[in-house]
Amino acid sequence: MRKLIFLLFICASTLANYPYLDFDTSSLNLSPYTYRRYVRPQLRSMKKDFYYVVKRITYTSQDFINLRENSLNLNLAFERAYEKCRKNQKLCYEELKDVVGRIQAIERNIKSLREDFTKLPQKQFEKVDDYIALLANLDQIDSYSLQVQTYIQLLHLTDKTNFAIYTPRIDIYRSYVKQIFNLANDSFLYILPTDLKPSFEQFIDKFLSPVEEHMIPQMKKDWFFNRLGDLNMQWNVFHMDLEKGQTGFPKEYVRNVKIMHRRWNSILKLMF
């Protein structure tokens, strides 16, 4: 009896500690070659697998995914320009001029989504409130996009002139761009079944978005090492919620989640 109790205690402790990695970051290893050849491709594949699952469990069009991707790319482009614009306001337009195309892509996504709404099945939105909230999100994205685009046009007019130093600072527009990305994520969540939303929201906020911003565009080794324990925990929570939780996740797509899990484990094995 004592042996049984002891074994149960050990198993419970192991399961409790499993989601979070406890390690010394100095013991980790990640070379630029390993990142380019293995880690980044696996992270990108996990993201593609995630989108595949979402498209199978919803009635959504590709435009929701495109809206999220274009908003992410806009956010990344603005972040790259941010420090350079702060240092030299006169050259800010050169750093931001290519962003206009990304904003126009977002506007096309929203236009297409609004046209698609009339064709979606009734069960796409379980509550009228969800439908109204989604439309409000898209309106807000439109508003922020217009303000950012107007700012870039002003930079164009004053480009390389003494008037450039009197144009508004980039900081407020950077916050608008971040809001666009947040609203695109919120819009993406509205298309998911209600019982799955908490799991997917946590995964997007705590795992996918941070990885998209800090690890897929380029290798930020220190960031990745410092966040690895938390990222692993967030992934395992999502994985277990879908595979063994009471979320109502369709069993036929558990196989795809397991593939994502193997990809993540292969990344971990490369660094230990």
Image (cartoon, helix red, strand yellow):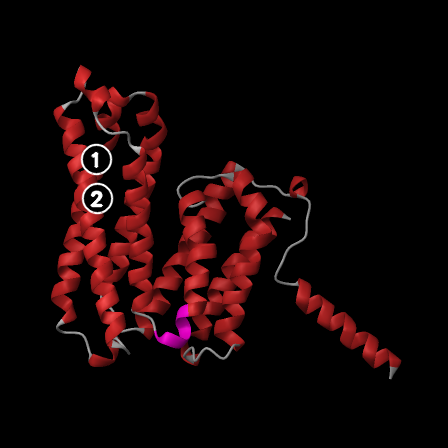
Asked if the residues shown at circle 2 and circle 1 are in contact, with their CB atoms under 8 angstroms apart, the answer is yes
Q: Distance between the residues labelled 2 and 1?
A: 8 Å
90 to the left or right of 222: left
In front: 261, or 128?
128
> What span is colored magenta in the figure?
193-197
- The amino acid beneath tag 1 is Asp
Magenta stretch, main secondary structure class: helix
Q: Residue at x 68, y 63 (%)?
A: 17
State yes or no: residue 144 in magenta. Answer: no
Q: Which mark is residue 102?
A: 2
The image position of residue 218, as x and y in percent, is: 43, 39
- Which residue reaches farthest right? 2
Q: Could you tell me which secondary element the residue under label 1 belongs to?
A: loop
Query: Label 1: few (<14), some or many (≥20) within 10 Å?
Result: some
Q: Mark 1 points at which residue?
A: 98
Q: Which residue is drawn at 35% across and 37% down?
A: 79
The picture quadrant where one finds residue 265 is: bottom right
The image position of residue 174, as x and y in percent, is: 31, 39
Q: Residue at x 82, y 81 (%)?
A: 4
In front: 119, or 263?
119
Q: Which residue is drawn at 39% across and 63% down?
A: 50
Query: Label 2: few (<14), some or many (≥20) within 10 Å?
Result: some
Quadrant assignment for the N terminus = bottom right
The image position of residue 221, as x and y in percent, is: 53, 39
119 to the left or right of 55: left
The picture quadrant where one finds residue 161 is: top left
Q: Could you tell me which secondary element the residue under label 2 belongs to?
A: helix
- Which residue reaches farthest bottom? 1
